[in-house]
Image: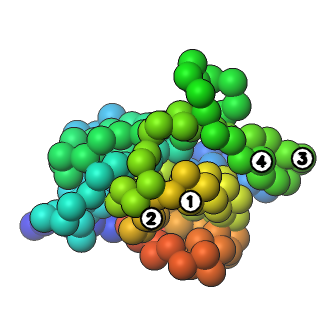
Amino acid sequence: MKSSLEDTLLAAIRTIPDYPKPGILFRDITTLLGNARAFRRAIDELVHPYAGQKIDKIAGIEARGFILGGAVAHQLSAGFVPIRKKGKLPFETVRVAYSLEYGLDEMEMHKDGVAPGEKVILVDDLIATGGTAEAAVKLLRQIGADILAACFVIDLPDLGGRAKLEALGVPVRTLIGFEGH
């Protein structure tokens, strides 16, 4: 009997209580990445709605978004653009500051990573409060990207990240949701 996508993914994601601080349930996708069947199903599901469309670039958020985004880019025959923490890229960059629960941070990408008007899908492992993904959307738009969607394996709907991106006019696709965090 073939298990559902949700069952496959839930079984492949490890939950670590009280990490990085008490009261947090950390959703660890390294176990999903190590499970060939679950990893393949997750990528296939992320790619499916966009198959056959002209997608120019996949933008992945450091670090798990690099792994997922690279696989999605390969499947869609699109280029891949890394969005990184400040100071990690060697060429001319564009940068955006964003709020974290404990202060400010910055992310950047190469200035020539996306040309104005290119069709881009943003990819990361998880959407929680949406601060990092919202900053990535603003960064991509700053250089003229046409953001078709933001895709995540996991949604933590109680934290409101999806709503933040949808308020920016970015459709959000997630594969599974976890209540609580």
Question: Mark 1 near mark 2, Cβ–Cβ under 8 Å?
Answer: yes
Q: CA distance from mark 3 to mark 4?
A: 10 Å
Which residue is found at the position 47% from the left and 37% from the top? Answer: 112
* Mark with earlier residue (4, 2): 4
Give coordinates of residue 158: x percent, y percent: 67, 75
Identify the element where label 1 is drawn.
helix
* Residue 164 visible (yes or no): yes
**Could you classify mark 1 by the number of other residues whose Cα lies within 10 Å: few (under 14), some (14-19), or many (20 or more)?**
some
Tell me the kind of residue under disc 4: Ala
Q: Position of residue 164 (x, y in %)?
A: 65, 74
Q: Which residue is mark 1?
A: 141
- Can you say whether 8 is above or below 80 in the image? below
Residue at x-position 74% and y-position 41%? 106
Image x and y of residue 165, in percent: 59, 72
Which mark, by number, is residue 97?
4
Q: Residue furthest left?
A: 1
Which residue is at 33% across, 35% downward? 34
- Which of 4/45 is in front? 45
Name the front one of labels 3 and 2.
2
Tag 4 secondary structure: strand
Residue occupied by mark 3: 103
At label 2, the amino acid type is Ile
Q: Nearer the viewer, mark 1 or mark 3?
A: 1
* Label 3 element class: strand
On-image quarter of the N terminus: bottom left
Which mark lies nearer to you, 3 or 4? 4
